[in-house]
């Protein structure tokens, strides 16, 4: 039986990670930073310079900002957050933006109000805003996590600084306690009342945007294509709704998403397949909630080794978790869950992240296809053996190895991806 401390820490991890965000989290982080910097400045500056790490530029470049009148880009995110953002709403900072705010933001953009500079930083998620005007200036910096403000200066005076910011931002709960076996035991035994509200919010939000995406009004309408042109199966419906949710989010839908590990796409991919499978198979609400707890925590566990942003596509981690959760719901043993994870990570760890955009939906659909195949293989007792490629004897070691490749091994890949994208 798990200790009460483990239950408390795992619930705290879920509470910290499963938060609402309206729109792709990178432009929203810029809007949040801008809204907070405006508060410090005491009004609107004359000009803003947005220094952004390569991963930030990559992930903002091609995504539509919600509640923006279909604007894209770093300058648009910063300017809209500056004009109409509510920093108190954090990742829903643009929820209260008005049509007048959008018009004013577009006017300022046409006059060069904001300019972007590449920030040469070893930190993948790194923002530095410099506001000037009327003899005043403000510097605000975010590092490692989307709302993790690490420094604020006004007219050269340091108003706020985090003393020890040499590594990843540390949330309150202890993520070092995460491991596959304990995650499963938590999912099996936690009192449902302790996680019900949190996960029911995820079901409501993420299924709402999936339904909206099925309208076909976003991107290529991949969800509808899957439903209309593929066989009518539970797997097709899982892929269709999950991809549709991603496409709507990347296409500027204003509905909020419950994110996972700082990503809406990962929040969608680690939850929607689980929900659709449970409903299609007529499983109980309790089983669905337990499987969601399992999938979410497994995604967080995998992402701890990779980091918030990298050249490694987060759809792989989230889809792997959904596949393992489906094995869990199907009554698979612990060994079969391990097999599902190993089969998935033997298949698709090479998918690159070339920024947030509507085609992320296709990567999610492909990743889920691999995860479902891995599930079926595992349920037949079939799995690739240790030392096949990067697979290790222990599942946790395989996960950490994939994380090392994504975080450290693909650093140069990340730079080359950004270079290619900026060449036009």
Image (cartoon, rainbow, N blue to C red):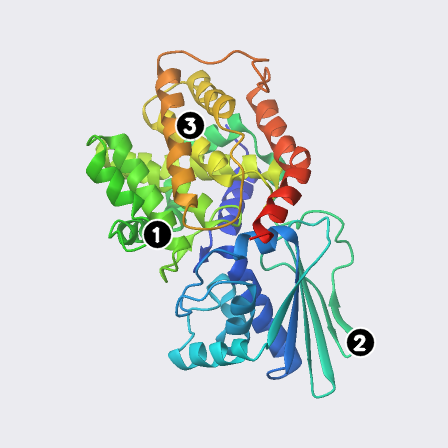
Q: Nearer the viewer, mark 1 or mark 2?
A: 1
Q: Earlier in the sequence, mark 1 or mark 2?
A: 2
Give percent across and percent down for residue 33: 60, 67
The residue labelled by disc 2 is 156
Do the numbered discs 1 and 2 sit on residues whose CB atoms are within 8 Å?
no
* Residue 219 - label: 1
The label shown at residue 324 is 3
Which circle, 3 or 1, is nearer the viewer? Answer: 1
Tell me the element at label 1: loop
Q: CA distance from mark 2 to mark 3?
A: 51 Å
Is residue 419 at least partly visible in the picture? yes
Relative to residue 128, is residue 274 drawn left or right? left
Label 3 to label 1, Cα distance in Å?
29 Å
**In front of the other: 153 or 327:** 153
Return the residue found at the far bottom.
Answer: 134
| Earlier-in-chain disc, 3 versus 1 | 1
Q: In the rendered image, which quarter is residue 46 located in?
A: bottom right
């Amino acid at each position: 039986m798990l200790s009460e401390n483990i239950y408390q820490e795992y619930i705290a991890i879920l509470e910290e990670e499963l938060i609402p965000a309206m729109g792709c989290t990178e432009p929203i982080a810029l809007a949040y930073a801008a809204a907070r910097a405006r508060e410090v400045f005491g009004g609107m500056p004359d000009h803003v310079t947005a220094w952004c790490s390569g991963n930030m530029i990559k992930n903002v470049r091609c995504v539509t900002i919600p509640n923006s009148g279909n604007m894209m880009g770093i300058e648009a995110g910063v300017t809209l957050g500056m004009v109409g953002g509510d920093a108190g709403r954090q990742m829903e900072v643009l929820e209260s933006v008005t049509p007048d705010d959008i018009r004013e933001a577009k006017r300022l953009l046409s006059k060069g109000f904001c300019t972007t500079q590449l920030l040469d930083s070893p930190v993948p998620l790194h923002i530095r805003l410099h506001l000037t005007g009327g003899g005043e200036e403000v510097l605000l910096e975010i590092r490692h996590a989307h709302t993790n403000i690490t420094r604020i200066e006004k007219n050269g005076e340091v108003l706020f600084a985090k003393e020890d910011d040499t590594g990843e931002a540390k949330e309150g709960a202890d993520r070092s306690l995460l491991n596959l076996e304990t995650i499963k035991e938590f999912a099996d035994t936690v009192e449902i009342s302790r996680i019900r509200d949190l996960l029911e919010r995820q079901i409501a939000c993420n299924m709402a945007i999936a339904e909206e995406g099925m309208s076909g009004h976003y991107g290529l309408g991949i969800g509808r294509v899957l439903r209309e042109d593929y066989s009518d199966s539970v797997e097709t419906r899982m892929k269709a709704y999950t991809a549709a949710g991603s496409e709507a989010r990347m296409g500027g839908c204003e509905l909020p998403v419950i994110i996972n590990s700082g990503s809406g796409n990962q929040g969608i991919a680690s939850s929607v397949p689980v929900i659709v499978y449970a409903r299609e198979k007529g499983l109980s609400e309790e089983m669905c909630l337990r499987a969601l707890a399992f999938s979410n925590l497994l995604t967080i566990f995998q992402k701890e080794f990779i980091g918030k942003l990298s050249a490694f596509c987060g759809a792989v981690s989230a889809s792997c978790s959904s596949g393992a959760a489906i094995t869990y719901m199907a009554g698979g043993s612990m060994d079969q869950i391990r097999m599902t994870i190993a089969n998935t990570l033997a298949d698709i760890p090479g998918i690159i992240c070339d920024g947030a955009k509507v085609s992320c939906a296709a990567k999610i659909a492909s990743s889920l296809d691999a995860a479902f195949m891995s599930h079926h293989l595992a349920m037949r007792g079939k799995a690739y053996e240790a030392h096949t490629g990067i697979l290790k004897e222990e599942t946790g070691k395989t996960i950490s190895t994939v994380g090392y490749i994504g975080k450290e091994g693909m650093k140069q890949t990340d730079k080359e991806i950004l270079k290619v994208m900026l060449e036009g």
